[in-house]
Image: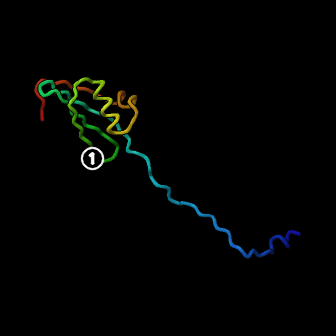
Amino acid sequence: MMLRILGRTYDTPRYVITNPQPEDTTQPSITAIYVEICNESSSAEAKVISDQSGDRKLQFDLIVPEDVEQAISRKLAIPLQEVSSLVQYKVSNACSR
């Protein structure tokens, strides 16, 4: 019986289509967010540090920390709780721009 099963030929070949290299959809991991709030110009500048090369700089016309965090969350498409845990603030009267 086993020889009959193993000896069978199939007229229709069957193929399995796979994706051997899945697309890398992971975002770079953000390690820190430094925000400088400038009282003089009523603006904030955020520097986003990630595990990949090339840091991002974002500028906002906001000075309230909660508003800045929400804007960063929207811009980077990450949860607000993650932004809150990573952000560090520096408040200056005259900014170093």
| Residue at image location 50% in from the left, 59% down from the top | 21
Furthest residue in direction right, as rendered? 1
Task: Give the colour scheme shown.
Answer: rainbow
Q: Is residue 36 left or right of residue 31?
A: left
Q: Is mark 1 on a helix, strand or loop?
A: loop
Q: Where is the C terminus found, in terms of image quarters?
A: top left
Position in image of residue 84 (x %, y %): 35, 27
Q: Nearer the viewer, residue 35 or 60?
A: 60
Q: Is residue 6 left or right of residue 44?
A: right
**Dividing the picture into quarters, in which one does residue 42 lie?**
top left
Residue under numbered circle 1: 54
| Above or below, 52 relative to 65 | below
Position in image of residue 79 (x %, y %): 40, 33
Position in image of residue 19 (x %, y %): 54, 60
Q: In this view, does 44 lie to the left or right of 76?
A: left
| Residue at image location 50% in from the left, 56% down from the top | 22
| Residue at image location 53% in from the left, 60% down from the top | 20
Alpha-carbon neighbours of circle 1 within 10 Å: few (<14), some, or many (≥20)? few
| Residue at image location 83% in from the left, 70% down from the top | 5
